[in-house]
Image (cartoon, rainbow, N blue to C red):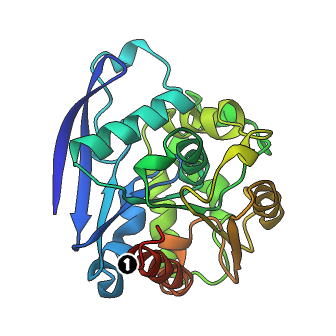
Amino acid sequence: MGGYLNLEVRGRNHRIYYETAGEGQPLLCLHTAGSDTRQFRSLMNAREVTQNHRVVCFDLPYHGKSSPPEGWQKFEYRLSSDLYVETIMAVVDALELTRPIVMGCSIGGRVVLHLALRHPERFAAFIGLQSGAHVDPYYDLAWLHRPDVHGGEVCAGIISGLVGPAANDLDRWETIWHYMQSGPGIHKGDLYFYKAEGDVRGVTGQIDTRRCPLYLLTGEYDYSCTPDDSRALADSVPGSRLQIMEGIGHFPMSEAPGRFLGYLQPILDEIRSQASSGFA
């Protein structure tokens, strides 16, 4: 089921698209840079998840079916930590989500760390997919938005190598297609947060997993947020839990949804068990 939220974020009006499926403990899913909630289509159709969880996904402004805010043409799009966190919290409040589990991938895997630092009391658990405290740029970001280059095809070319070998052709090319449809300069604007402004090195040790647990799942073939990046993060956050997903790259929920569910389901079961016992 889908719909729109009309929200004010940082003094600007936004029309944000969201989808929801299932019933139970809310599971809020955050998509990657330059893509949208279609990445979670398989998860939202997984009966083993939706029978216990209300899965909620939304497109960030400028992404997917969410429009840019009014007056967008006057500004360069740059996603900042404050804007990202405030947008997420505005959606949580508008949908009246009570202590949801929040799971994000890539930039979403980074912002869950910001949420854990700023709003641990608002969430039941954090799940970071391809989550690291920082990622150094390994390509020239200027290529992502130039008048003489097709931005969508460049973005798709850059991310295509991040899809792991476990992906079949259907899932691989659907993941790539989402990037080919990204708006002009949107992937580049997201990476302002991911590769520069959203750096949380040096402060991740302040995350208190006793207040809200942190689970980390990283694909072994990801060379953007590498397994070593996630290991460094896990070492810096006492009580965090890390598992490396075999055969998977940077987009587990869309490139290899069946394999990914095998890693995710035990985590969801554990969170639900702790909640029922009164531990969470």
Q: Is residue 72 above or below residue 209?
A: above
User: At x 76% / y 56%, what residue is drawn?
Assistant: 233
User: At x 17% / y 44%, what residue is drawn?
Assistant: 4
Q: Which residue lies furthest to the top in this view?
A: 74
Q: Which amino acid does label 1 sit on?
A: Ser
Answer with the quarter of the image where residue 22 lies: bottom left
Locate residue 219, reporting x and y percent: 68, 72
Image quarter of the N terminus = bottom left
Residue 176 placement, left or right of 70: right
Locate residue 60, reporting x and y percent: 38, 42
Locate residue 183, reporting x and y percent: 42, 38
Note whether residue 76 is visible: yes
How dense is the environment of label 1, judged by Cα within 10 Å: few (below 14), some, or many (20 and up)? Answer: few
Residue 41 placement, left or right of 79: left
Q: Nearer the viewer, residue 55 or 240?
A: 240
Q: Nearer the viewer, residue 192 or 82?
A: 82
Q: In this view, does 79 lie above or below 74?
A: below
Locate residue 226, reporting x and y percent: 78, 62
User: At x 64% / y 41%, what residue is drawn?
Assistant: 194
Query: In the rendered image, which residue does mark 1 sit on?
Result: 276
Answer with the quarter of the image where residue 242 lies: bottom right
Q: In this view, does 161 lie above or below 138?
A: below
Total numbered labels = 1
Q: What element carries label 1?
A: helix
Note whether residue 149 is visible: no
User: At x 48% / y 52%, what residue is drawn?
Assistant: 180
Residue 84 placement, left or right of 7: right
